[in-house]
Image: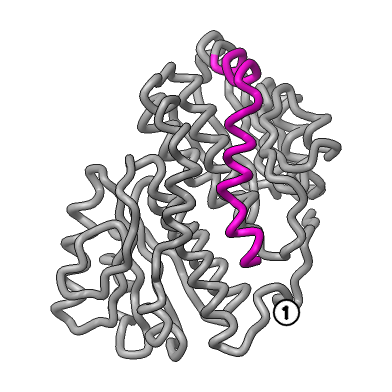
Amino acid sequence: MYAEAASASEAVRTQLTLDAGVLEALGATMRALAPRAVVTCARGSSDHAATYAKYLIETRAGVLTASAAPSVASVYGVAQNLRGCLFIAISQSGQSPDLLAAVAHAKASGAVVLALCNSPDAPLVAAADHVLALRAGPEHSVAATKSYLATLAALARFVAAWTRDAGLTRDLERLPALMDDAWQMDWSRALPLLETAEHLYVVGRGLGLAAAQEIALKCKETCGLHAEAFSSAELRHGPFTLLGPRFPALLLGQDDLTRPGVEALAAELAARAIPLLVAGAAARGGNPLPTPACRAEFAPMLLVQSAYRLIAALAVRRGFDPDRPAHLRKVTETV
């Protein structure tokens, strides 16, 4: 896990040298299609990438984006009316039966299917109308790291091509170097707090919610730490009453309109003496974790890159082997 997470920037570097023509053509296709809605379909880390896609597409392209429940197709056998919609299927392996069933139903219902996949020979690739290869290379760790970050980079490239965002396209060239910087960020001050924690909330908002979801999952599967992701707005609707000495919070921010709200929440929790870690925003009484300065679209990738290094160390500190999570395997096939 540690080695593959460290190599994520190289995966993105490789990706950025390829598929420019594919993206240009895909962007033109999206502008011609003018989808009435976008539907994402994924599970696990790929579904966290779908959260990133939702906020990126809705804020940059202005198109409603929602997450599909694969069981509607695979278990209930119901075909929905997806005429004129873009259906984005995201998977590292591209093999899960429920995802493939959802794709088949989507195509039969009139959707245009775009697959983001790390396995070029996967059934998902063969089933899709359009494909964006993740270019992450073989990933052996059960806990996906570089493929997740490569997915976010591919989504950013896709939306930049769709919306003709020349600034985002240009700045993507700097992303691998920023990821290298993020990997070197020292988050070790979080270890004493998290080593003894019984529970953890990981909190973000907007684009940052995807980072919160991914970090919480990795804490669960590799560290044996019960962690849950919340929007900073949702946390106020009851869940934050559980926070306490053995139940800290990790707050994530990015440089956009959501950051003041995250910082206000940080100040409120600090005033209650809640153990608090803050990355990408002002700490205001919490423990600050260093993050590279970057545009908001990149923050979820950089925060997760730094967190992966922390989590690999935390797993060992808590007595776990991050490369051998209990009861898990690399490819999960659900129906």
In what quadrant of the picture does the C terminus appear? Answer: bottom right
> From the viewer's perspective, is residue 36 above or below residue 269?
above
Mark 1 highlights which residue? 326
Left or right: 109 in relation to 265: right
| Image x and y of residue 69, in percent | 63, 47
Residue 234 shows in this picture: no
Closer to the camera in the image, 10 or 41: 10
Closer to the camera in the image, 70 or 89: 89
Q: How many marks?
A: 1
Q: Name the amino acid, label 1.
A: Ala
> From the viewer's perspective, is residue 285 above or below residue 141?
below
Is residue 5 rendered magenta in the image? yes
Is residue 97 rendered magenta in the image? no
Identify the residue at horizontal 17%, vertical 81% (top origin). 272
Left or right: 134 in relation to 226: right
In what quadrant of the picture does the N terminus appear? Answer: bottom right
Q: Which residues are magenta?
A: 1-27
Q: Secondary structure at mark 1?
A: loop
